[in-house]
Image: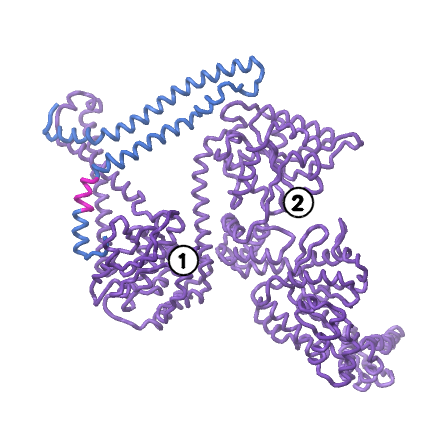
Amino acid sequence: MVKQSVLQKSIKFVAKDILFDLVYWLYWWYTQGLKKAFISMLDLIATGNKELGLMIWVKNLFKPMFGQYDWQGRLISVFMRFFMIIIRFIIFLFWVFIALVKFLLWILIPIFIVGQVLFNLNLVSF
Amino acid sequence: MNKDNKKNNFIICPECNGTGINAGKKCLKCKGVGVALYLQDKVIYYGASFNSAHILFDKIVRRIEIAFNVVLGLIGLAGILSLIYYGYQYGALYFLSLEYWLTPSPLKLFFWFSLLVDLYLYYRLDQESSQKNKVLPKQYKSSLSSNEILDFDTIWQLKKSKLVDVSKSYTEESKKAIQAAFELTKHFGHDRALRVHLFAILTQFDASAIILARLGVNFEEFKKKVSKYITKNIINRGGDPVLSLNIHKILLIAYLEAHENNDKKVDLMDIILALADPEQMDLRSETDDVEELLIEFDLTYQKLKNVVQWLRIQKRLKENMTQFKAKARYKPKSGLDRAMTAIATPILDQFSEDLTLQAKYGHLFPCIGRETEIETIFRIFEGSRDGGLLIGSQGVGRTAILHGVAQRMVEEDVPESLQDKRLVVLDIAKLLAGVDASGAEQRLLMLASEIIRSGNIVLAVENLHNLSGITAGNQSSLDLSEVFAQILGRHQFYCLATTTPPEYSKAVEGRNLGSVFQRVDVKELEVNDAILVLEAKSGPIEYQNQVYFSYNAIEKAVTLSSQYIHDRMLPEKGLAIIEQAAIMVKKEKGENKVVTGEDVATIVSNISNVPVNKLSEKESEKLLHLEDKIHERMVDQEEAVNIVAASLRRARANLREGKRPIASLLFLGPTGVGKTELAKTVADIYFGNEKAMIRIDMSEYQEKNSISRLIGQGETPGQLTETVRKNPFSLVLFDEVEKAHPDVLNLFLQMMDDGRLTDSLGRTIDFTNTIIIMTSNAGAQFIQDEIKKGSTIQTIKESLIDNELKETYRPEFINRLDGVVVFKPLSMTDVIKIARILIDKVIKNLEEKGITFEVTDSAVSELAELGFDPKYGARPLRRVIQNKIDDELAKLLLENKIKRRDKVVLDTGGEIKIVKADEL
C-alpha cells in the first residue's frame, strides 16, 4: 500500500510474494480454487446437456417426428423418443460422472500427493 | 467520460504540490502519492514509484518471477521423465503391482514432489491470468459525496478497502509506457516528467502507434516536431526527475476512462484518451502544452475516441466470431431441427436460400447498431403471429437486419418460439422463372404447405412488393400477392419481409398483404452509427485492396456523402465511397498505402461534381481573384460582382452556415444591364459549366395554383423540385420574380431559410448546395431616375429596401436574402466595353477559320451607340452586332471573297476592307 522504498519492497517481495505465497497456495486450493473447480464441473455438465440435446428431446416427447401427424406416426414417435431419451440419459449420466470425478480429483489430489511424499520419505507407512 | 459534466475533484497534496516528492524525499503528507481522486465511494491514487531504483527493482522482480516459473516448470518436466525412466527400468506393468506402491524410493519421492510443484505452478499461472486488481466496475449507487473535500490526513485514516491503488490495474504495456516517459525525461535531463514526455513516447508502443497511424500522423514528422518542442520549451533541469502534477492527474484520468468503458485493465488507449481529455485542455501551461501538439497534429478527444472504438470493434468482431463458432456448433447442418420434428423440404430448397446455414458457416457479416429493430421483430413474433415487414429505403441495411436475425437464431439468442428454427429467404426470381402466374401460384402453395408441415421454418421475403402485379390476366384471377396474403393470414408460420417506403404505399398498404404484416421502420443510420458500421466493414476492403484507411477517410466518407449524395442512403453510400477510394489509392499509389480523407473527398467530388476536397493552391488563387475572373465577362457592376464573389469564397472555404443555400441573392435593376449574364458567369465559374443553371421564368407562375407546377402534383414531378433533385449543385435563377404569385414567394421562404423543400411525393429536396438568384425589374425606373440625379448605389439600395421593395415583397422575404444587389444602368463607356467583349467573340470564331478580323475603335463606338438603348440596356447590342458584322461576314464567306489567312478590317460606317494574303 502506498509508495514504499526499495528496501520495503524487497522485504515485501521475499516475505509475501515468495514465502507467504506457499501457504496461501494451499488456502487458495480449497477456497477460491475449489469454487472454480465446482463451477467448471457445472459447466461441463451443462455442455453435456447441450451436446446431447437431452432437454429438447424431453420437451418434444409427444411431438411426432418428421412431420408424421397420423396416429401411427405419433405412436412410433413416442416410442422412438422415449428410447432416445433413455439412451441419451445414460450417456448424460456418464458425462455427469466424469464431471464429478474431475471435481473430486481436485479435492483429493493434493492430499494424495502429500501422502505419497510422506510415504516415500518413510515418514508414514501403510 | 464525465458525461454529467461533473468536474473531477482532484485532491492535490499541498506539501509537494502533487509531485509526491518534497525536497528530494518522498512527501510525508501524501506518502508520495501526490494526487488522489474520488471514484464512487472510494479514493483512487497511483501508488507505483517511478525513480530509477524502483524501475530497476520492478524489472528485476519481473525477471525473477519469470525465472521462478521456468524452474518450476522444469522440475515438473523432470518428474514426468523420472516416471518414464522408472517404467522403462521395471516395465509398465510394475506400476500396477502392490510392491511398487509399498516400497518407498527416492525417485518416486521426486516424482510426487514434482507433481506438487506442478500444482503450485498451476496456481501461480492462474493467479497471473486471473483478473486480480481489475478496474472498478461501474456502479449506479450513490457515491461518496465529493463535496466533503478531504485532505490526505483523513484519506489515510479511511478503511483499507476504500483505498484503490490504480497502478495495479495498469497493463504491463501501459506501465512500460509510463516508464519510457520517465526515462525520456531523464535522458533529456529534465527535472520532472510532463505530459509532453508521455505524448512523445506514444509512437514507440504498438497499441498507441496504431491509433496515431489510423489518424494519419506521420511518425517522422511526429518525432521531429515533438522533440523540437521538448528541447525548445522545457528548460528546467536537474537530478532525478519526478512525476509532475499533470502526469499524476493523467494516470488517474486514464483509470477513469477504463472505468467508464467497463474495461478490466487500464491500457495505452486509455492513456491517450486521458492526454486529450477535454477537461484538461484548460490546464494549458507554457512548458507542458500537450494541447498545442494535439492541435498541431489535428487530434481531438472525439477523434481519438472514435479510433479507439474502431480498434475495439475489430477486436470485438474477432472475439464474437470465436464465441459465435462455439455456439454455432449446435445448429444442425441439414434442414432438420434438433428436435427432429421437421421434414425435408425439397421444393422450398429449390426456390430459397437458408440464411441460418450461411450464418452457421460464418458467411454473413455481423449486423451493427440494429438491436432495436431486431428486438421489435422478435416482439411482433412473440405478441401476435403476424409477419414483420421491414420498411426502409435502398441501402439502409434491411438485408443486414435479416442477417442479424439469422445470426441470433444460430446462437439461439432468440425468443423461445424462434428457437431451433431456420430462416429461409425466398428467391422470387426463381419462383417466377419459367412459369406463368398460375404456375407461380401453384409453386407458392406447394412451398407453403411444405413450410407448414415442416414447422421449423421462418420465411423471409426480400422486396415483398415484387409479388404484386402478377396475375393470370383475366379479371377474376387473383394477384400473387393476394395468394401470399391468404396463406399468411392463416398464421401457420412466421414470415419476415422487406420493402421500400414508396413500394409499401403502392403495393402493400391498404391491401390484404398490408393487413397480415406489422411494420418495422428501418431508418437511415445516424452519422456516428454509420461511422461504426464503416469501421467494422473496412477490414475486408482493406484486405482485398491491400491498403489502409485513415480515420479521416472513414469519417469523411460518412459526413461528405450525407452532405452531398442524396439519392442513396447511409451506410451503403459511405461503403461504396470507401471501396472506390481504396481501389483508386491502390491504382494510383500502390499497395500498403493509406487512404486519406483527401482521397475520399476526391471520390465524392467526382460523384457529385462539387469541389469538396481541400483547396489546391491554384484554386485558392482563382478564388482570391474571383472578381477579375468575373470581369473578364462582366463589365462594371462592381458592387454586384463583389457581393457574389464574397459569398462564393465563403462557401468554398466552408465558412457558411450548413443548412442554407450557398447564397440567396436578389438582383435589382433595369433590363439589359447584366443580371442574367452575372448569373451565367457564376454558374460557369463555380459549378464549372454555364449549363449548371436552372432558369425558371416566374412570369409563368402568376396563378395561385402554379405552385403545384413548381413542386409537383401527385405523380407528376415538379419543375423546380425535380430538376434540383437531379442536379443538386446548380445555380437556380428565378427571372422576374416580382411577377410570381405571392404564395409562390412564401414557398421560397422555406427554401431560403432551411435549404429544403418537400415535393408532392414527400421527398425532401436539398437546396443547401445551390446558389439562388432572383432577378427583378421592380424599382427599375426608380434606379434609373436616381442614377440620373447622381445618388450613390448605397443610398439607392437603402431607399429601395425601405420603400419600393416593400410594396412588392413581404419583409420576411427580404430579410432572408443574403444580399440585395442593385445593378446600375449602363453608361456609354460600359456599352463600348461590352461591344468589345462581344466583338472579341466574333474574332475568336474567325480565328478558328484562319481569318484575322480587326475592328477599329471608332467602329466599336459606332456599334455601341447603335446598340445602346437606355430602356433596354445592352440587349439590342447583340442584335446590332449580329446584323452589322455576322451577317456581312457570312455573305462574304459564302461569296468566297474571304479565304484562309486573309485579314478583314471593319471601320466606321460598316465599311469592310479585305486584305488579301499573299498567294503561296
Please, what is the three-letter code of the amino acid marked with disc 1?
Answer: Lys
- Any part of residue B915 in sight: no
State which region is magenta.
A16-24
How far across and how far down the image is residue B50, in percent?
Answer: 26, 59
Q: What residue sits 51% from the left and 33% below the top?
A: B415
Q: Is residue B835 left or right of residue B727?
A: right
Please, what is the three-letter code of the amino acid marked with disc 2?
Answer: Pro
Q: Is the magenta stretch mostly helix, strand or loop?
A: helix
Residue B92 versus residue B837 in the image, above or below = above
Question: Which color scheme is applied?
Answer: by chain
Residue B60 versus residue B364 in the image, above or below = below
**Residue B624 circle label:** none
Instruction: Label 1: state its secondary structure.
Output: loop
Which chain does the residue under circle 2 lie in? B
**Residue A18 painted magenta:** yes
Relative depth, front residue between B2 and B66: B2
Instruction: Label 2: state its secondary structure.
Output: helix
2 or 1: tag closer to the N-terminus? 1
How far across and how far down the image is residue A123, in percent?
Answer: 10, 29
List the single residue furthest toward the front: B148
Q: What residue sits 42% from the left and 61% below the top?
A: B278
Task: Give the letter of the blue chain.
Answer: A
How far across and how far down the image is residue B109, in percent?
Answer: 15, 32
Relative depth, front residue between B188 and B900: B188
**Image colour assigned to chain B:** purple
Res. B153 image quadrant: bottom left
Residue that label 1 marks: B6
Residue that label 2 marks: B501
